[in-house]
Amino acid sequence: MTTLVIVGVAIMLLGIGWAYQTANRLDRLNVRVDLARQSLHAALDRRSVVARAIASDMAAGSDPVATSLARELATVADRAERVDPPDREAAENALSGILARTDSRARPPALIAELADAETRVMIARRFYNDAVRDTRNLAERRLVRWLRLGGHAQLPVYFEIIERAGPGNP
């Protein structure tokens, strides 16, 4: 009988230890998602700033079509930077589409390099964010983790999907 009690207590302690470690891991993963989201939004904001600089450069010319496109680009860049998080994907895709419609050959080399750098940073930040979301969801969706509510009442993070690089065939 004593052996059964010892085995039962040992199993209970192992279960409590597992639950504690899993809850801590889930908390660290949620922090990782938050930090990756901040980094992604910073990269997206930087791309919007570069898009407005491109729009300003385009508006300086005398071509009325380019001036109209520059106004549209500036408006969409402003909207992408100020939109609520649930609508950010659509706003960023619209910005990518308009950037693809602009003539990259007419840009100064500095703006070409700046936009390429900004888009690369967005691509990397999005991948880090989506990796963090995947890891968090994989742990949080385990049956025992859900049953024991080790994640509390936190919402599961959602993936961020945008067009990474818009080109002529990829609006």
Image (cartoon, rainbow, N blue to C red):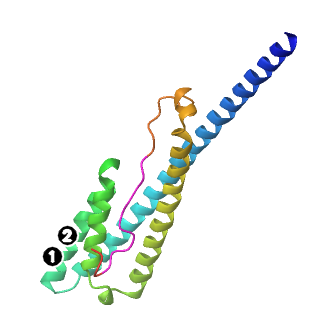
Name the quadrant of the C terminus: bottom left
Q: Which residue is labeled 2 in the image?
A: 72
Marks 2 and 1: in contact by CB < 8 Å?
A: yes
Instruction: Report the amino acid beneath label 1.
Output: Ser
Q: Judging from the image, what secondary structure is the residue with disc 1 in?
A: helix
Q: Nearer the viewer, residue 138 or 29?
A: 138
The boundaries of the magenta stretch are: 158-167
Q: Nearer the viewer, residue 163 or 107?
A: 163
Q: Position of residue 25 (x, y in %)?
A: 64, 40
Task: Name, please, the residue furthest toward the left.
Answer: 64
Q: Which residue is labeled 1 in the image?
A: 68
Look at the image and say whether residue 74 sits in the magenta stretch: no
Q: How many marks?
A: 2
Q: Is residue 38 above or below residue 139?
A: below
Q: Nearer the viewer, residue 76 or 163?
A: 163
Residue in view at x 62 percent, y 33 percent: 23
